[in-house]
Image: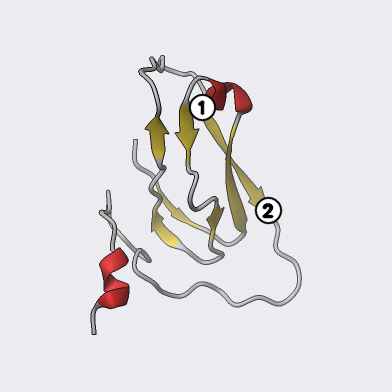
Amino acid sequence: MLKSLALNDGTVNDTWSSVGRLGMFIHVTAGFGDVGFAGYWTLEIFCIQPIVIYPNVEICQIYYHTIEGEYDNYSGGKYQNNTGIQPSLLYWGFEK
């Protein structure tokens, strides 16, 4: 299920060690959401061995944190206001 999120607080994605012990790794490269991001998140999942995931089994969690003090609101970037599943846009940094 895809969900579009508009974030006004900081977020952190996390998983449980029991899931990692099965050989499933979730959101390893970018565990924080940007304050002000609006769009669909990509949840990165990879397995180092075959694994069965049953319906309704929780494999990760998202924390929402209150931001205090001054901060710059995220206002743009490759994935801001995206619609649906996104491929990597890493190449944007190399285009002139």
Say which label, 2 or 1, has the lower sequence index: 1
Res 88 quadrant in image: bottom left
Q: Amino acid at mark 1?
A: Ile
Residue 28 horizontal/vertical position (percent): 50, 44
Residue 77 horizontal/vertical position (percent): 39, 72
Q: Name the image quarter holding the C terminus.
A: bottom left
30 or 36: nearer the viewer: 30
Res 80 quadrant in image: bottom left
- Along the horizontal axis of the image, is 84 left or right of 36? left
Q: Residue 59, which numbered label?
A: 1
- Along the horizontal axis of the image, is 5 left or right of 33? left
Q: Name the image quarter holding the N terminus.
A: top left
- Along the horizontal axis of the image, is 62 left or right of 70? left
Q: Amino acid at mark 2?
A: His
User: Which residue does the numbered mark 2 point to in the structure image?
Assistant: 65
Give the SS element for disc 2: strand
72 or 22: nearer the viewer: 22
Give the SS element for disc 1: loop
Work out which residue is located at the far front of the displayed protein and give it. Answer: 48
Q: Is residue 55 above or below residue 67?
A: above
Residue shown at 41%/74% (left/top)? 76
Residue shown at 51%/72% (left/top)? 74
Residue shown at 38%/14% (left/top)? 52
Residue shown at 50%/19% (left/top)? 22
Work out which residue is located at the far right of the displayed protein and give it. Answer: 69
Circles 2, 1 touching at the beta carbon (< 8 Å): no
Residue 67 horizontal/vertical position (percent): 70, 63
- Along the horizontal axis of the image, is 85 left or right of 25? left
